[in-house]
Amino acid sequence: MSYLAHTAHWQFFGLVLAVLGLILTVATSGVDDWRVWYVDDVSVITSGTAWVGIWRACFYSTVLDTAEFCRRISLTDSFVPPEIAAAQVLCMAAILVGITANLVAGYAVRRAYFNIDGHIRRFFWSAGALYFLTATCSLIPVFWNMSSVLKNRTIDFPPEFLLPPAPYKQELGLGIITGTGSSVLLILSGLLFLSYRQTSKPRKQNAERTEKKNQAGTNIRTAALHANRVREGTDNSALTVEDKL
């Protein structure tokens, strides 16, 4: 009963990695600090640091009514740069595709561990392809926003955001770091699922081979027993003739 189960241990490990990768993908989409801005004017942004994510821009202040001041970034806003707009769309696509990939992968691993054959490779390979698609949807906005940070590109925020159009310095935030890590995990999972090979023979063929071996052994034993009986009969006949003489 283990002719399929023992072939899918690495794929089970890949499924665990993929679940962790999907959790990080969701976290990447939700964090506010894709870009860390350092500003000169601390009259409003008293901490001197602001966080720009793909959904919100926030900073801490001691002169406003709330300690953490945030404004939502919408896809339809005219000031939104293309890398942030693309991140909003692709991160949601990555989550949906990642959920689908985990469902397909879990189904494939379940079939392997329960010895349910029938095009099982297709399920493993489909899961691997979906993991690569998930990683691609995550890496495109991550690398695009990383490039904007390294080039210190600005965002023309409207006045209600209370943010300057450009910081004097900006750094990579947690969102870009977790997005890179989640993509690496998903790529590793995809490679493990695409490398699946069903090396064992199906159970039916194994059973037929065992039956043939048992039948051959029975025939050999039957022939040996028959030969012994014939030999014993011949010896007994000879002894009888000698006794008569």
Image (spheres, rainbow, N blue to C red):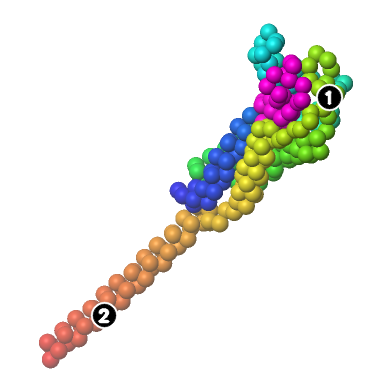
Q: Is residue 94 visible?
A: no
Q: Disc 2 marks which amino acid?
A: Arg
In this orientation, which residue lies closer to the viewer: 179 or 166? 166
Q: Is residue 16 magenta?
A: no
Residue 212 quadrant: bottom left
Q: Residues within 10 Å of mark 2 (few under 14, many from 20)?
A: few
**Residue at point 63% right, 46% down?**
188
- Label 2 sits on a secondary structure element that is helix
Residue 85 quadrant: top right
Q: Position of residue 36 (x, y in %)?
A: 71, 30
Q: Which residue is mark 1?
A: 165
Left/right placement of residue 180 relative to residue 41 reads left
Q: Position of residue 93 (x, y in %)?
A: 73, 31
- Label 1 sits on a secondary structure element that is loop
Residue that sits furthest to the bottom in the current view: 245
User: Gap between marks 1 and 2, in whole Å?
Assistant: 108 Å
- Is 81 placed above or below 1 here? above
Residue range of the region highlighted in magenta in the rendering: 28-52
**Residue at point 49% right, 50% down?**
6
In this orientation, which residue lies closer to the viewer: 207 or 159? 159
In this orientation, which residue lies closer to the viewer: 188 or 208? 188
Residue that sits furthest to the top in the current view: 65
Q: Position of residue 113 (x, y in %)?
A: 50, 43
Q: Is residue 38 magenta?
A: yes
Q: Position of residue 191 (x, y in %)?
A: 64, 49
In this orientation, which residue lies closer to the viewer: 242 or 125? 125
Q: Disc 1 marks which amino acid?
A: Pro
Q: Is residue 30 visible?
A: yes
Residue that sits furthest to the right in the current view: 78
**Residue at point 68% right, 22% down?**
47
Q: Which residue is mark 2?
A: 231
Q: Work out whether mark 1 precedes mark 2 in sequence or the reverse, and give the earlier one.
A: 1
